[in-house]
Image (cartoon, rainbow, N blue to C red):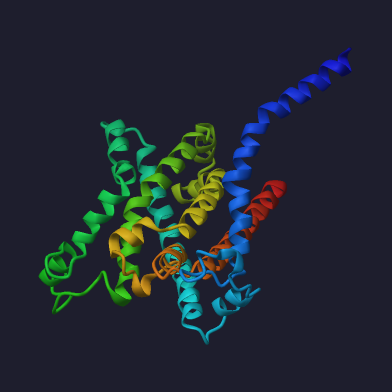
Amino acid sequence: MGMLSKAKGTRRAYWFILPAALCMLFVHFIPIIWGAYISLLDLDVYTLTQWTSAPFVKLGNYIKLFSGKFAVGQRFLRSVYNVFVYGLVTIPTGYIIGLLVALLLNRNFVGRTFVRGIILLPYITPDSVAYNVWRFIFQARIGLVNKYLLKFGLIQEPLVWLVGKRALTAVIIASIWKGWPFACLILLAGLQGIPAELYEAAKIDGASVWQQFKMITLPMLAPVTKTLLLLNVIWNFHAYNQFYILLGGSVGEAHVPSTFIMQEAFTNLHYGMGSAMSVVLMILIVILIAILLRSKRRASYES
């Protein structure tokens, strides 16, 4: 009787899981397989109406992406380089700013709750609003950045920020401003989970403030830090809004994979090439996430 009821419970559990599994199948797995198949075709605006007879180029699209002989390959590799630079600057900088502010907000002072709410304003501001404001700030003729750089004599003439080699720098600055409050919120939650007794014992043993931070705060924040790093890596490789809104439709030299895929697939109408780039980006993200999860698991075993 017990085995029969257990089997019924198992079947009932599968029925409850079935809707989620079907959603995953139709929303994720089928589109991924479909995109991988399209990446093997020379599918564009001319062959789209008869896509079943589109030329099957096998790995031709992928060869073009990783070959310096083709313009699309050069630009795609440049976009991958840009997103790595973008992440290597925004993630550590946002973490450091968030940690410093979190350490401040973890202290008791008058108006602490109000300040905690205020610092979230950049993060909760919609992307369309925040990055359009930054677009105005970086304007060459009337922007505040050039205004104050000229005022303090740091430049002799207005700089062009939103086009060319400085465009990536402009997006990085705006993204750091937009993203650090989230890091602060997560790290503040981690700080509040550290037992106060550890600091009291460290003070009794004569540990300095730096020693307490190094030996207690950072190790105790390690799990939160690794989770935050994992989320930021995923979000940074999917970066699109900040580049498109801040730089407009012509991202130019500041292309990252998401914006370049959008341009190649839906502006230039090279669907096969766009799908190939999407597959490469997905594989790259999966590899990075696997490395991060493996390191996180190894660290948890060692601890």
For the N terminus, the quadrant is top right
Asked if residue 196 is positioned above or below residue 40 in the image, the reply reads above
> Residue 273 location, x and y as percent?
52, 70
Q: Does residue 164 appear left or right of residue 284 in this picture?
A: left
**Residue sitting at x 58%, y 52%:** 31
> Residue 56 location, x and y as percent?
63, 72
> Residue 12 location, x and y as percent?
73, 23
Q: Please tell me which residue lies in front, 160 or 224.
A: 160
**Residue sitting at x 77%, y 20%:** 9
**Residue sitting at x 63%, y 32%:** 19
Q: Does residue 181 appear left or right of residue 287 in this picture?
A: left
> Residue 213 location, x and y as percent?
48, 48
Picture quadrant of residue 109: top left
**Camera sees residue 289:** no
| Number of marks | 0
Q: Does residue 215 appear left or right of residue 121 in this picture?
A: right
Q: Please tell me which residue lies in front, 30 or 124.
A: 30
**Camera sees residue 257:** yes
Q: Please tell me which residue lies in front, 172 or 54.
A: 54
Q: Does residue 15 appear left or right of residue 175 in this picture?
A: right
Picture quadrant of residue 114: top left
